[in-house]
């Protein structure tokens, strides 16, 4: 005898949409963050801030407005201190919980999640990179613990000369240059910019944004990530903080995996929001639409499979990076090979999640009829945001990099590294994990 269908509870019948979303949450919680109560506790703590961001997301995406109120709510709730050590006034969550919470933020508004990528990346540099003087680390961790936001400026503006950090006549540091893709800079109290010093060494230079010599332009014209507070940033002999010049360690390979996993967390959040939108559309359907119902259920089920796949890959990769960090701290001399191999594995996860996200954000429109194309619903924002994130460190070259490692044992720390100035493969810019 076939099993009987589960009978809906009375409360479910009264609030079908809430009940449907609760079922999705219950499925997620079976595997999410090792069943820890910490994630549930933190989600309750940040629920109001993330709800504020979600309530403004559609209008702000449509109108190109920044989420200033939502960002302030995140700071006030402690979200920006998630990876600050507890002894320094932070929450000190493991990476698995961090990326799960960033997925929550990405579901609400992926632009805001991306705006904080440079901020959380800087915290990770302070935590993981050896050689940073204790007074430098303590100062910046302290600034972040008090609610300061650190923005990001790395990509040079087209045809712009190299950004330079140099000594001024008064003995202090100054920064001059022009950057683009400065995600989060319009929300930031400080900006961490990549630069070269007088001898050509790669450095970080950190400047306060409240000086006239730092000009932030909201000229990001992308069709996605419109609330990421990006655009171009010009530094005109800007004063660098006295503790704001740090050497970039070329041997640090941990960071490559971290920054790519950050993108995966945002993409996983987008796919989850796609599932929830498909559920909402189909929970209560007018009678004339019932003939479409079975097909719609197939679409919703397929979308949840996409979400579960992305979530599982993100969870496994974050857990592995946490374990690698622990090994690196316990045995600094032996940490290089695990990080390099993890970078290889992150490539596979990244390609899989990006392809899953792009397919899901298109398949969503099969969940109902032409009403889903309404500009009021703005469901196209999911594809626009996912496609824009996928264009960071272009995914198109990554299967080739993975194949090169598997066949030839070569791997590149950057997706751009395999190519010389003429666009030809450059094998001498690779490293071989294990050698």
Image: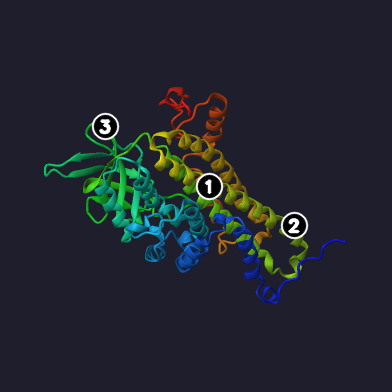
334 vs 400, nearest the viewer:
334
**Relative height, residue 234 to residue 376 (above, below):** above
Residue behind mark 3: 200
Provide the secondary structure element on which disc 2 rests. helix
Give the percent coordinates (x, y) of residue 280.
63, 65
- Alpha-carbon neighbours of circle 1 within 10 Å: few (<14), some, or many (≥20)? many
Q: Assign a secondary structure to mark 3.
A: loop
In what element is the residue under mark 1?
Answer: helix
Q: Is residue 86 left or right of residue 405?
A: left
**Tag nearer the camera, 1 or 3:** 3
Which residue appears farthest toward the front when viewing the image?
Answer: 330
Residue at 68% in and 60% down = 368
Badge 3 vs badge 2, beta-carbon distance below 8 Å: no
Left or right: 390 with respect to 288? left
Spatial distance from mark 1 to mark 3, Cα to Cα? 35 Å
Q: Please determine whether, in this image, residue 10 is positioned above or below residue 88.
A: below
Which residue lies under the disc numbered 1?
A: 387
Q: Residues within 10 Å of mark 3 (few under 14, many from 20)?
A: few
Residue labelled with disc 2: 295
**Of pointers 3 and 2, the one earlier in the residue sequence:** 3
Q: State whether residue 34 is above or below residue 407.
A: below
Query: How far, Cα to Cα, is label 3 from label 2?
Result: 60 Å
């Amino acid at each position: 005898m076939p099993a009987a269908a589960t009978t809906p509870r009375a409360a479910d019948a009264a609030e079908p949409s809430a009940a449907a979303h609760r079922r999705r949450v219950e499925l997620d919680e079976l595997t999410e963050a090792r069943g820890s109560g910490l994630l549930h506790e933190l989600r309750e703590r940040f629920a109001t801030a993330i709800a504020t961001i979600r309530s403004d997301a559609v209008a702000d995406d449509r109108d190109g407005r920044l989420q200033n109120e939502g960002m302030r709510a995140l700071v006030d709730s402690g979200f920006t201190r998630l990876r600050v050590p507890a002894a320094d006034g932070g929450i000190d969550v493991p990476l698995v919980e961090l990326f799960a919470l960033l997925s929550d933020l990405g579901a609400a508004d992926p632009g805001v999640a991306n705006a904080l990528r440079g901020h959380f990346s800087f915290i990770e540099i302070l935590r993981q990179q050896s050689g940073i003087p204790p007074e430098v680390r303590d100062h910046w961790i302290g600034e972040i613990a008090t609610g300061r936001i650190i923005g990001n400026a790395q990509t040079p503006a087209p045809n712009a000369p190299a950004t330079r950090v140099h000594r001024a006549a008064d003995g202090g540091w100054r920064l001059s240059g022009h950057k683009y893709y400065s995600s989060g800079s319009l929300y930031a109290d400080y900006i961490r910019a990549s630069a070269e010093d007088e001898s050509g060494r790669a450095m970080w230079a950190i400047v306060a944004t409240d000086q006239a010599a730092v000009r932030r332009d909201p000229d990001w014209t992308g069709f996605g990530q419109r609330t990421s507070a990006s655009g171009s940033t010009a530094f005109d002999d800007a004063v660098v903080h006295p503790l704001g010049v740090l050497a970039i360690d070329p041997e640090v390979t941990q960071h490559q995996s971290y920054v790519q996993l950050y993108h995966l967390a945002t993409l996983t959040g987008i796919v989850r929001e796609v599932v929830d939108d498909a559920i909402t559309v189909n929970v209560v359907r007018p009678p004339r639409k019932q003939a479409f119902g079975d097909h719609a259920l197939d679409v919703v089920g397929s979308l949840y499979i996409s979400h579960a796949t992305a979530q599982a890959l993100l969870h496994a990769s974050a857990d592995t990076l946490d374990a690698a960090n622990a090994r690196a701290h316990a045995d600094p001399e032996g940490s290089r090979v695990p990080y390099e191999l993890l970078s290889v594995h992150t490539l596979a996860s990244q390609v899989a999640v990006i392809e899953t996200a792009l397919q899901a954000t298109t398949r969503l429109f099969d969940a109902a009829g032409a009403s889903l194309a309404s500009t009021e619903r703005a469901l196209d924002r999911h594809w626009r945001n996912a496609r824009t994130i996928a264009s960071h460190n272009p995914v198109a070259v990554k299967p080739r990099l993975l194949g090169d490692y598997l066949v030839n044992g070569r791997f590149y720390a950057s997706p751009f590294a395999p190519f010389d100035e003429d666009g030809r493969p450059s094998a001498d810019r690779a490293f071989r994990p294990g050698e």
